[in-house]
Image: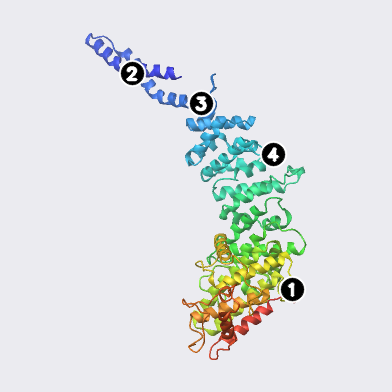
Amino acid sequence: MDRFERDLARLETALGVHEPRIRQALSQLQLDTSALSALREMGNWISSERPELRRRNETIQSMTTTWGADAADMVPFNEALYNRASSNPEVYAAAAQLADTAKTGNVDGKTIAELEKHIGDPAFATMLMNALGATTFRNVMAKTVKGNKTLARLQVALSKAVGTASPRLDASWRREFITGLKPQDHQALAKAIKHGSFDSSFLLQVARAIDAHDRKLPAQGGTALRDPHDDPITDMMTALSRNPVAAQDFFAQDPTALKRFLAERPTVSGKQAVGRAIEAATTVFRDRDGTAQNPSRGFTSARLASEFIHLQAERALMGAQPAVPASTTALILSAYIPDVDLVASRSGLSGAQVRSTSDATMPPNEPWGAQFRTEDLRTVMKEAFEEDPKTVRTLMTAQTVWARRVLDHNAASGDPGRFMAAAKEVGAGFGLITDATGLAGIAEGQKLDEAKSQRMKEIMMVVNSGLAIPQHGGWPITAGVVGAWNSLIEDSAKTDVNKNQATHEANTAKARSKFLADQLAAQAMLDHGLFGQQDHRSLSFVKPDGSLMTLGEMTPKDAVQHPNFDAYEDWANDDHEGTIWLETKERLEQAYENAFSEHK
């Protein structure tokens, strides 16, 4: 082919040079030159066809050398595939090699290497998907499901390639991809979306197809025996967790979806993936836009969060094992901690899902809130705390940060009634969380088992560093913010607090968290001058920047006496006549006590 193309090039040159000379010579002899038109037409034809011939030659070379093993024999040329590949040599070669893989399950390492170079190119990826066709692409993915390391590498590359192409794939390609599925084809679909970044509508369409196929009975063409360690639902949830739009639509648009994956369709190795997908659906989009009739994504997030907690409580009360990790429950509750506080100070009997009116104590422009039932919260918190003691820290920290924000906002308003109402809600929130730890009845000196000891340690770490936990802009929080909090708390709590020498230290979890709630209220009042003049008092517990020392700072481990703590306790126990401190503290502490369950 190379020689043929070179010979044509020489012929084109010869015709271009000699045809005018021959024409001139014949004209000078007054001979007929009309027959020379054939030579000119031949030259023009060669000139127009040589680029296409070169492309075809490059296509063959790409397929036999660049994209696969060198071939000594001639390779058949697929005209239909060449047309579908838009005459692109690289696309043709890739599609030809992959079409063979769909039949044999074999793939050359050179093919994968070349594919990996092109998967980020939208034009190439789209042409490749159209050249292969949706069914052949799915068949290739099916070969990678139980494949070796080479096929696993191919799986990643193809998944990323279809992700790159997904915004450009038309409705017919998408429809073909998810129809006519054989019993195990939903595994191929799941592997196809496992890696890479996808158009939300494409991802949602594929996820629904995987779910629909997974729901089928064997008699309906469904899978007779699932492999618990290679569950397509896990791959599907992993993909959804990376695309919050698709994740939210998947759970919001199907009223059975949350219940199915929380209570009816558990995964053996996919708890983390399911949890992250639900987190994406409930915590990423937070806004105050839209209405109940025309809900925004923030409204939908709140509705799903409310439904999640209720379903988690129902399942827990039935004694079924959780389908998501405790960290997911803790993150969602942390993101909606203002709503936890609100319901903790009320009956919690409403069946609503979204809080439609802003509480008077709320800072302006807060996002839509979730409506919870108080006992649902208590149930899911207790389960999460028992499963993973670190979730105690997550909830306590979120509660601390929110308490500082809402108390500061209401102290700045200058309205005593609003500030005391906020303090009441904060106290109820701390009480509900502390009650769920199961540590409220632990008396001084009582020996704790390992699980309770860890929960106590988590509370101690938060209380000891509570006032030092930084605010991170507005609300709500995210998984990244929780991670930052955890790092700070762990750094500030490298050692346990002094349990033996601290004469005045709180001895139980209940006293510890109530101490922190009181201290947060006191800090807000100090910050906004609500204690008035205090020149006659010892304020050794107030740092130069005006902030109160944390409990850990007031009770250093190696000190036999804690004068700063003594001074703070005397100051906090004072009524501070002429201020709202006494009434605020009483309301907060009463709400705190009321949040504890009557039945243990």
Mark 3 / mark 4, whichever is N-terminal: 3
At 69% from the left edge and 44% from the top edge, which residue is drawn?
A: 230
Q: For the residue carrying disc 2, how many other residues have a C-alpha within 10 Å: few (<14), some (14-19), or many (20+)?
A: some
Q: Residue at x 59, y 45 (%)?
A: 193
From the top left corner, tell me how far across and down residue 392 is, in percent.
65, 66
Earlier along the polypeptide chain: callout 2 or callout 1?
A: 2
Q: Which residue is mark 1?
A: 446
Residue 372, picture quadrant = bottom right
Secondary-structure class at tag 3:
helix
Residue type marked 2: Thr
- For badge 4, the amino acid type reads Lys
- Disc 1 vs disc 4: which is toward the camera? 1
Amino acid under disc 3: Thr
State the mark number for residue 13: 2
Marks counted in the figure total: 4
Q: Is residue 301 visible?
A: yes
Image coords of residue 535 (percent x, y): 48, 88
Distance between mark 3 and mark 1 Cα atoms: 76 Å
What secondary structure is found at the residue carrying circle 1? loop
| Distance Cα–Cα, label 1 vs label 4 | 61 Å
Q: Position of residue 385 (x, y in %)?
A: 69, 65
